[in-house]
Image (spheres, rainbow, N blue to C red):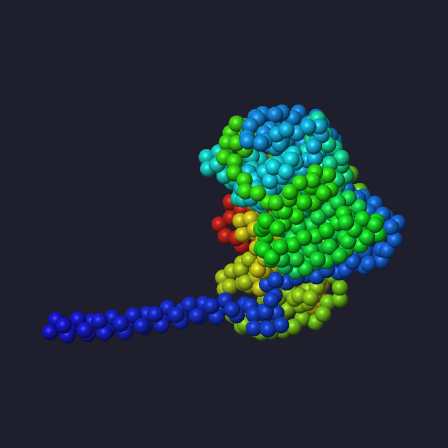
Amino acid sequence: MMKLIFLMATKYYSFFKIIFVISVTLLINTKVIAQDDLNVIHSWIRFSDASNSLYHHLAGQAKDLLDKRASIIAGLHSLPDWQQRQKWIRKTIMDIVGPFPEKTPLHAKIVRIIDKDGYKIEHIVYESQPGFYVTSSLFIPAGIKGKAPTVIYCSGHSNESYRDTIYQHAILNLVKKDFIVFAFDPVGQGERLEYYNPKTGKSIVGGPTTEHSYPGAQAFITGSSLARYIIWDGIRAVDYLLTRKEIDPARIGITGRSGGGTQSSYIAAIDDRIYAAVPENYLTNFTRLLQTIGPQDAEQNMFNAIIRGIDHGDFLLIRAPKPTLMITTTRDIFSIQGALETEREVAAIYKVYGKEDNFNRVEDDAPHASTKKNREAMYAFFQKHLNNPGSSKDEKIQPLVPDDVRVTTTGQVATSLGGETVFSLNRRETEKLVNELQFSRGDLTKHLPHVLNSAKTLSGYWEPSEINDPVFTGRIQREGYVIEKYFLKGEGDYVIPYLLMKPDKPNKKALIYLHPSGKAAEASEGGEVEWFVRNSFTVLAPDIIGVGEMGPGVLKGDANIEGSSQNIWYASMLIGRSIVGVRAGDIIKLTRLLKKEAVISEVYGIARKEMTPALLHAAAFDTAITRIALIEPYSSYRSIVVNRFYNSDFIYSTVPGALDAYDLPDLAASLSPRKLLMAGITDGSGNIIDPENDNIDLAIIKATYHFRKEDGQLKIISLKSFEKPYDLYREWIK
């Protein structure tokens, strides 16, 4: 009997379990279907790659610019032609990287000397800029007589920098071959971690590429670059070497692999005291880089490089006819095809100079790695061109123990010496730019028109072209209104999916609603968008490129910080554009689309968080957006740059180089006398700002509205006093 009861219970348990699972599945599927109803292009095969549209759009524009450069190079034949190109390269690179700081005393100190079998290591700290400490080591072979050849060794992206056993191997082999080797820590590596946490012994922000990109983004906003700081460290390394009696100034070489390949390429291009250069595992060309892994960390990018006509080959062309060797591997992350194309380009100038033997490329069948074959090619190259003959055989070495390669007392500049960082130096530059802005703001009649022109140029804004007819993809009926789904051609070969929510009784007013999570974020029943529709507004909620169905794309990159890939932002910077500039153009296109409708007489705009700069730019460029509401906006680009830690999500909406001419508050001020609501303002770190306190960012906005006697049109408030988000808008829509 008990067995029968048990079997029946088990049977009914299984039955109810199945029913439960089916019910839950139906509920989940119903929810998914409801969410999918708000998608516009998900079933269109034509747009199956829509999420990558932003990157493809930027890379496509880069390709056009690079094709123009290739045509120029193809037209160079005579030596005078090439020499003119070299002069142009030098001027252009100095313009986009510089200006460099003035040369100040190095205050170089030998802090430790380590004697080893056959050589000694002098650990040195020098100041490339006042208080900007560079940790370095000079490896000196025993028995050196007279002046010796020297190789500067640049480290790739390793936490240990040149202390890494891979780099030690190459360094100590060079020392065995009677080369003096000078190795220094790049910022963010080795003993120069700029975000060092003494409790964990690690970086707060991440590995070497993040240590580069985190302050690098701030530098780009000021119009500078991390490359500027790293190159200057290398130039000052040469300055130090020339103070040493052992160094032959006519026989200085430089090499490095991966990130060290980047550094050695850039330093050798700019400092003509370097006679022989051997960059390894880096050089390709921008065309192939953009087609493969995309732009890499901030160290490897120069401000507006592609739009100014610079490609990887230019860093070698400028050196001709000095000895240069490209070291490559066939399965490198940096396209071997691009390396082959750059080789052909550079070989042409050496041929015209009659110095074909001074340029070469070697390769090994390997991934992104150091190989015996390639190392031996590097040794032989330096032996030949720095006049230091001997065997080029790669020898086994005994790796140094950590204490042998420690420079500072604690193993970190941050805890041993303190001093400046890229952030602190760039912040000082920012203060100068902001002071200039403040001076300009003293004359609003001149300042604001200049702001608009500068914002259009620096953001890379393109005036929207002809508006094509939108494509209708579906309709959803809700009580009191209808949702229509459309897509419209964007600035390039991509579309803007959007929801058009039409009330049964429209008031002839339309609203563009921008949310960082996309069009569907507040479009559900009971959502914020519905509130406006029920207040008789026609609402257009788009997925702006890079958002919702149009993003974020597959590229994560080596500058993927807190889920935001700065690598895509670098792509925009390289071509003289910005993501916010592209988005602003598309927002204006949507505004004009709405204005074409006979039933719409006025268009308002609302944006949240990191979408607010795009709306600000659009509204500043086109007065058709008559009222603007910015909800939880960050206050300024200045605030991102002057805060050591910032919200990485904000970087997409920044404009490289903006602070040289304008900031977001200037655009907000230019909206006067239009009605402007700013609620829940934060700083660049996402911390709430009290709107009642004096604030450098809010002051220009308040002053402009007051100057034009339109104080009532401006409302800057906290979010704390509102229980419901809708309360924000009741006064604003009146």
Q: Position of residue 623 (x, y in %)?
A: 73, 55
Q: Position of residue 521 (x, y in %)?
A: 53, 60
Quadrant into which the N terminus falls: bottom left
Query: Who is closer to the viewer here, 634 or 427?
Result: 427
Q: Residue furthest left?
A: 1
Res 284 visible: yes
Where on the picture, by quarter, is residue 44? bottom right
Q: Position of residue 439 (x, y in %)?
A: 75, 35
User: In the image, is 196 to the left or to the right of 50?
Assistant: left
Where on the picture, by quarter, is residue 658? top right
293 w.r.t. 719: above or below? below
Query: Who is closer to the viewer here, 250 or 506?
Result: 250
211 w.r.t. 614: above or below? above
Q: Which residue appears at 62% of the width and 36% of the height?
A: 175
Q: Which residue appears at 63% of the width and 47% of the height?
A: 376
Q: Which residue appears at 51% of the width and 69% of the height?
A: 36
User: In the image, is 33 to the left or to the right of 547?
Assistant: left
589 w.r.t. 401: above or below? below
Res 667 visible: no
Quadrant into which the C terminus falls: bottom right
Number of labelled discs?
0
Q: Position of residue 377 (x, y in %)?
A: 66, 48
Query: Who is closer to the viewer here, 25 or 351?
Result: 351
Query: Who is closer to the viewer here, 100 or 495?
Result: 100
